[in-house]
Amino acid sequence: MTEKRIGDDRGGATILASFAILALVVVAAMILQVGAVVSARHRAQSAADLAALAAAGALDRGSESACAAAQDVAGRMSVSVGSCAIEDWDATVTVRARVELSNFGVKEVEAIARAGPVESD
């Protein structure tokens, strides 16, 4: 019969490998969470850019509902308009997009865009 000694380290590699796999899973989960936020931020910025262009286009056509055009475009991109400001021929639009993070609940990202005519000298 074999006698087990206190200094015996059999099975130590299994425990070390288990902790290493756990660390890899945690890092992978964190990368996925950060990727989801970055993706939502890019989606919000694209929506803000398009909404600002829609508002500026509506101003150019003489429409008084430039912010309504921005809200229509933002709604189609599944984001909400936080603010819409018209100053002279410039439209500034702020949008918010929601991102669901599995471990941290629901977060919002925000993006701002401005569109209008180019200043000429």
Image: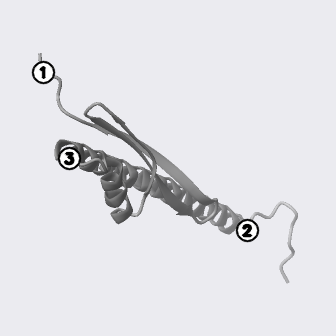
Q: Is residue 85 above or below residue 30?
A: above
Give me the C-alpha separation between circle 1 and circle 3. Answer: 19 Å
Disc 2 target residue: 10
- Report the disc number at residue 57: 3
Is residue 37 or residue 25 the one in the foreground? 37
Q: CA distance from mark 1 to mark 2?
A: 78 Å
- Judge by depth and name the residue closer to the eye, 22 or 8: 22
* Mark 3: few/some/many CA within 10 Å (<14, 14-19, 20+): many
Residue located at (57% from left, 62% from top): 101
Disc number placed over residue 99 in the picture, else none: none
- Please tell me how many numbered marks the rendered image carries: 3
Query: What is the x, y in percent for residue 60?
Result: 18, 42
Nearer the observer: mark 1 or 2; the answer is 1
Residue 66 placement, left or right of 25 = left
**Mark in front: 2 vs 3:** 3
Secondary structure, mark 3, is helix
Counting residues from the start of the chain, the first of labels 1 and 3 encountered is 3
Q: Residue at x 64, y 59 (%)?
A: 104
Few, some or many C-alpha atoms within 10 Å of disc 2 (few <14, some 14-19, many ≥20)? few
Q: Earlier in the sequence, mark 1 or mark 2?
A: 2
- Crowding around mark 1 (Cα neighbors within 10 Å: few <14, some 14 to 19, many 20+) is few
Q: Quadrant of the C terminus?
A: top left
| Image coloring type | one colour
Q: Position of residue 17 (x, y in %)?
A: 62, 64
Q: Secondary structure at mark 1?
A: loop
Location of mark 1 (residue): 120
**Residue at the farthest bottom position:** 1
Q: Nearer the viewer, residue 102 or 95?
A: 95
